Amino acid sequence: MLENNLIIDSKDSFGGWFEDFHVGQVFKHWPGKTITEMDNHLFSLITMNDNPLHTDENYMSNHQHGKILVNGLLVMSLVVGMSVRQTSGKAIANLVYEKVTHDGPTFHGDTIYGVSEVLDVVPSRSKPDRGIVCLESRGINQRGEKILSLERKFLVKRRS
């Protein structure tokens, strides 16, 4: 869209249509997100996960990690959320989250980045105006260590 000689991102640039995806395609998601103590505590409390691993510094001082661990579902939510703009922004529905692995710990102050790779692209057999895209998304910390991976499938329309 052109408005007063400025190019404005339109809703068409948010996510991809079915035809935009191909097996082996890699998306690097930027910017990253530095996880604060408040992010972790708030997420843990609003999801009613009161495990002291995520909220009790004294308890964790005697734990093998010696400090509070960031809630793994927060990390997963961030990695998926980071991917939406480039991948599933036009999705009709998210269908499956599977093969989630927590590959390393995340602590307050760590910065999470995301990378997604297209694993499969399957046209719908029942509705020719859409198809299913399967991605593997990985969370990487500021040291380049993989801390999370997951596969997900979403249903997306074809271009008109």
Image: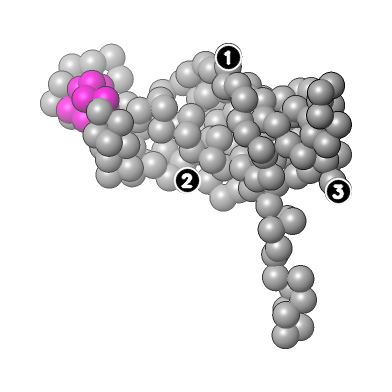
Q: Nearer the viewer, residue 64 or 56?
A: 56
Name the N-terminal-most of marks 2 and 3.
2
Does residue 58 appear in this view? Answer: yes
Q: Secondary structure at mark 2?
A: strand
Instruction: Tell me the amino acid under the disc marked 3.
Output: Ser
Q: Secondary structure at mark 3?
A: loop
Query: Position of 127 compared to 79: left or right?
Result: right
- Where residue 134 sits, quadrant-wise, is top right
Label 3, on which residue? 160
Q: Which residues are magenta?
A: 49-56
Residue 99 got which mark?
1
How far apart are the alpha carbons under marks 2 and 1?
A: 23 Å
Q: Position of residue 15 (x, y in %)?
A: 70, 46
Residue 33 got which mark?
2
Instruction: Tell me the amino acid under the disc marked 2.
Output: Lys
Depth-wise, is mark 1 or mark 3 nearer the camera? Answer: 3
Q: Secondary structure at mark 1?
A: strand
How far apart are the alpha carbons under marks 2 and 3?
A: 35 Å
Query: Position of 91 compared to 70: left or right?
Result: right
Q: Nearer the viewer, residue 125 or 80?
A: 125
